[in-house]
Amino acid sequence: MATYLYYDTVRLNKGAGGVLNVSEVLLRHMRLSHDDRVEPVSERHPRLFALAQRLKINRFIVDTLLYNFHCLRTLLTGERLYSFFPNYFLPLTLFGRHRDSIVIVHDLQYKAYPQYFKRSKRLFLDWSLWRAARSAADVVFISRSSQRDFERHFGRCEHSAVIFNPVDAPRVAAAPAALPNERYLIAAYHYYPHKNFGGILALFERMRRAGLVDYLDITGNGAAEVERMVAALAPEVRGFVRHRGLVSREELLRLYQGATAFISLSTFEGFNLSAAEAATLGVPLLLSDIPVHRELFEDYGFFVGSASSDTCQLARHLARNERAHPVWAHAAACAPATIAGRYLMLKRGTLSLARAMP
């Protein structure tokens, strides 16, 4: 039985957002394996982890210390140990080229929007990803779009795979006080410039005027920024944008299920987990026409563009979805247990890296 040491030190970064969610879902389902032992470093080294939390020690330093300690330990004990890094960074080491490691590269947003990242952060990411490209680790990309972005800047990895994110979106019971005929769009993500809230508000205004929806519900951080943008809307529309802030997981799933459609007009994404959650639940998607949206939702979503954003076409799309209830093609492949199994197979050798795909 192989042991995987899962570096859940991403928890030390409180602003990790969706990456932290993916990491926790993946860890939970990898630990269900009967053939492998998966242990988070926070449990194997609880005192060190607690100290790092208390002193706010950079997780890259923690990862480097622990990885080298375990490399030395396996040399002495002969233990079969693999290291799993769920967020970009391979630690520095004198013990080989990380052939015992798996690292996930989520996206290269800092390349698309360098103005939103400090120069020191950009340089560190450049250095870290350059090292990953030249390592012997299994480098996993969360979409082909993300892989293409990476290879354009850093070249091909020695061992690479594309494995979609796990999508954990079970159906939940409707709230007792839910209004059955309420028509709303759901935008379930934090405020960031690339999320294009201006475009979302503009499309909502057009859809409301056309009688397609009544409300726009927004969840996550960034209420103040959104409220400033809402203030510029026409008075007859302004009062129908509801920023719900941070909601529980169960409430979010209810909001998905009751929505007329999920909307995401992002100008950049590595995967778009929120859209995948909504699609798993059968909710229609209104999406920006960017490569990863085409990759994931080609035959499912409605792509908003200069020609295709006509409200008549949009109305026909929503009516067709209501009649046919299409199924997202990748829903089964993105089930958390399936994705966890694909990661574990990378080191078992029973699935070639070329086929490690949803």
Image (spheres, helix red, strand yellow):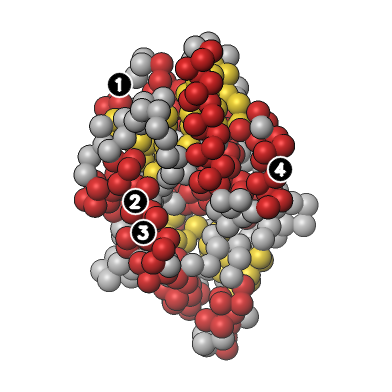
- Local crowd size for mark 1, using a 10 Å CA cut-off: few (<14), some (14–19), many (≥20): few
Work out how far the residue at label 4 is from the one at label 2, CA to CA, in angstroms: 28 Å
Sequence-first tag of 1 and 2: 2
Q: Are marks 4 and 3 in contact (CB under 8 Å)?
A: no
Q: Amino acid at mark 2?
A: Trp
Q: Does 139 appear above or below 345?
A: below
Single out the residue that lies furthest toward the right.
Answer: 176
Quick check: marks 4 and 2 in contact, CB under 8 Å? Answer: no
Question: Which quarter of the rendering shows the C terminus?
Answer: top left
Q: Secondary structure at mark 3?
A: helix
Mark 4, secondary structure of its residue = helix
Give whichever of 286, 4 is nearer the camera: 4
The residue lying toward the viewer, choosing from 317 and 103, is: 103
Rounded to the nearest angstrom, the CA distance separating label 1 from label 4 is 38 Å
Q: Secondary structure at mark 1?
A: loop
| Residue at mark 1 | 352
Amino acid, disc 4: Ala
Q: Amino acid at mark 3?
A: Leu
Q: Residue sitting at 25 percent across and 48 percent down?
A: 154
Q: Are marks 2 and 3 in contact (CB under 8 Å)?
A: yes
x 56%, y 83%: residue: 228
Residue linked to disc 3: 123
Amino acid beneath label 1: Ser
Report the residue marked by disc 4: 50
Residue that numbered label 2 is attached to: 127
